[in-house]
Image (cartoon, grey):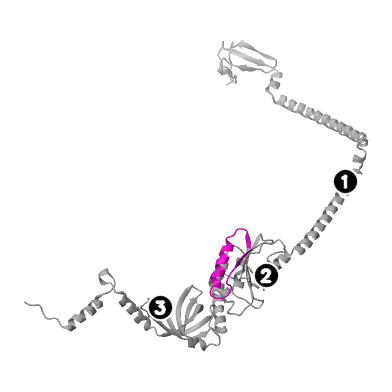
Amino acid sequence: MSAPCRTLADVTAEPAARAAARDGKSPEQAFPVREVSTRIRDYIGRLGRIWVEGQLLQCNRRGGLVWLELRDPEVEASLSVVLPAGAERAMASPLEPGQRVLLHGQFEFWMKHGRLMLRASEVRPVGIGELLAMLERRKQQLAAEGLFDQARKRRLPLLPRRIGLITGVDAQARHDVVTNARQRWPGVRFEVREGAVQGAQAVPTVIAALAELDAIEDVDVIVIARGGGSLEDLLPFSDEALVRAVAAARTPVVSAIGHEQDSPILDLVADVRASTPTDAGRRVVPDWAEESRRTAESRTRLDRVILAQLEQAQTWLEQTRSRPALADPAGLLPRLEHELQVLRTRALRALDHRVAGEQRELAHVRARARALSPLATLDRGYAIVKGPDGHYVRDAGALQPGDAVRVAVAAGHFGAHVTDVASST
């Protein structure tokens, strides 16, 4: 039987049927790249237009377009953006790296390069109100974690062996810190790290410098210093990653950012907050002139105390030497000899009296003992008889005529034989 004829519709439907049967879960059912890319493009295309907020990392202009790299400093995530040049010209000032912006557009997936891109149509700089609200939320979150607690803050060393300093390249802040510190303590040493303190690279630059200085054994304090600027300029010093790096540092950190009215979050987590870089230079080292004055005053007080103690000791020594016992030691001997004789006589008299009393007591005891002794009975003519078995005879009936007995009297003893027995029982 011949095979059935296949139509053109059957032939064209076969690839679609095979594609529908694929699920990508086995090598036999793998998707081709074009199909994966198409599915990604179609899925992303359904997301619609959205607003995205972030910090500009790069900003390049070519071919009537502005190519942007948008960064989220919280998690180091980035996103590519393309913007019509006309949208930038509509702004009051050109876009610059480090600036925070809001972009409105739609995501696209470029199948040729496998790249995700946000095609933006509108761009707005993030206003001061939005920035302040964002910083306040971040501040509350970090405070709830205890990163600003006073118990975590460490005291600065009295005289650091070496001071770590993080500033911008050739910045005035470096001059202010170093100059004021050396005016107070000329021999102070610095370990300086210069780098970006503004813009997209500021946060990773400062974190890297902080880690490097924190690892140096004789760096006893680290100063992060930057001159004044706008709220946007100082945003890197409110970055969460930088704040957490400072909280985790082994070395005490001094924050010296901007002017007195500036207050980045770094001020709250640092161990010491300096109002300006100049103030930081004064805080990290003692004042040599003031310390010299205090040392001189302390030496003067110590000298006075020592002299007073010496004078007191000298007075006591003179008073002691003026006493008769030391003024004429030999003159005391006759009096002491007389006192010794008197004490010796008293002791002998007391001893004789005690011995006589004990002798009298002994005689009384001896007399009482003698009166109670059996020997006193023998003195009155009585005798003690021991029978042949060696036991004392208490009953004459215990003896027989002819028994040998032993008789003890007051003055000696003798043997005898029983001639007759008369018992009283």
Across and down, in percent, residue 172 comes to: 66, 72
Question: Looking at the rendered structure, which numbered label has been put on residue 317?
Answer: 1
Which structural element holds mark 1? helix
Let me know if residue 136 is in the magenta part.
no
Image-based side of 62 in relation to 227, left or right: left
Q: Residue at left 71%, top 26%?
A: 369
> How many other residues sit within 10 Å of disc 2, few (<14), some (14-19) or many (≥20)?
some
**C-alpha distance separating marks 2 and 3:** 45 Å
Q: Quadrant of residue 145?
A: bottom right
Q: Earlier in the sequence, mark 2 or mark 3?
A: 3
Q: In the rendered image, which residue does mark 3 sit on?
A: 116
Q: Residue furthest front?
A: 63
Q: In the rendered image, which residue does mark 2 sit on?
A: 175
Which structural element holds mark 3? strand
How many circles with numbers are drawn on the protein?
3
Let me know if residue 219 is in the magenta part.
yes
Q: Earlier in the sequence, mark 1 or mark 3?
A: 3
